[in-house]
Image: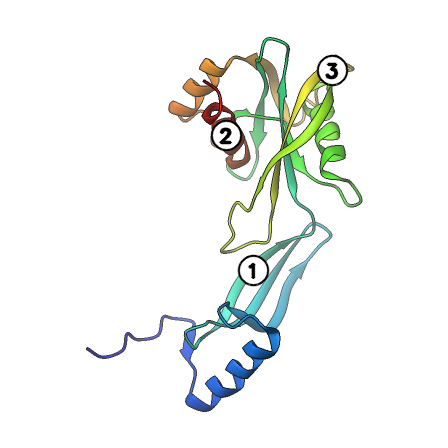
Amino acid sequence: MGAAPAAAGTRVLSASDRVVDRARYSALMIPDRPTRLDRRTVYSSPYVSLHLDRVALPGGRIIDDYHVIGFETGAVGAVIRNEGGDILCIESYRYPTDTVGWEIPAGQIDHGETVLEAARRESLEETGYAIEEPRITYSYRPMAGRTTAESYIVEAKVGDQIGDFDRNEVRQVRWMDLSTIRTLIETRQVSDGLSVTAMLLLLARTP
């Protein structure tokens, strides 16, 4: 059988190109990983950037226009529990998808903030509650093939209710037990990826 044709937007290295690029791999000491050969930044802001990279793949193929979305900071979601084990949830507006759905308090980490500081701030802004004893329980990359974004899950005990929640972002705040959380997921009433991940991880380790 003949070799498969190159996909649109890619080209196959010539023999001489392979020698040069293989040498570059060796110099970088990452012979088995894709390597960026060039980058053109299409858009940049303090929050997000869009890059077009020229990438050499380990098998010898070059992609001339690999789109990469870069985020300057990560995101954090807070699983807040009361003494009874209930979870503090918010019904949140999502403009890009034109939806309203149940989530955990979450948001982007501001420049100069730690993960835990961001969790405290987002929790207060979106629920009106302070949190106590926050700790990072998990981190992951939600779309590793396209973006550098990293998300963190923080678990904490609920503290005092200091004020009201931000009604520009949140429709309502509600305590939910784990049975209700499970039903929300099963009926697809939770669509936010960070919230789904945090809730499923919690349910997986709860008898």
| Amino acid marked by disc 2 | Leu
- For the N terminus, give its image quadrant: bottom left
Residue 76 sits in which quadrant? top right
Which of the marked residues, 2 or 1, is nearer the chain's N terminus? 1
Extreme residue in the top direction: 84
Task: Say which of marks 3 and 2 sits in front.
Answer: 2
Task: Say which of marks 2 and 1 sits in front.
Answer: 2
| Amino acid marked by disc 1 | Val
| Amino acid marked by disc 3 | Gly
Task: Say which of marks 1 and 3 sits in front.
Answer: 3
Query: Do the numbered discs 1 and 3 sit on residues whose CB atoms are within 8 Å?
Result: no
Judge left or right: residue 84 versus residue 109.
Answer: left
Q: Which mark is residue 159?
A: 3
Judge left or right: residue 65 versus residue 148.
Answer: left
Quote the CA–CA distance across marks 2 and 1: 28 Å
The residue that appears at 52% across and 12% down in the rendered structure is 177
For the residue pair 112 and 94, the one nearer the viewer reads as: 112
**Residue 162, position in %: x, y?**
78, 15
What residue is shown with label 2?
201
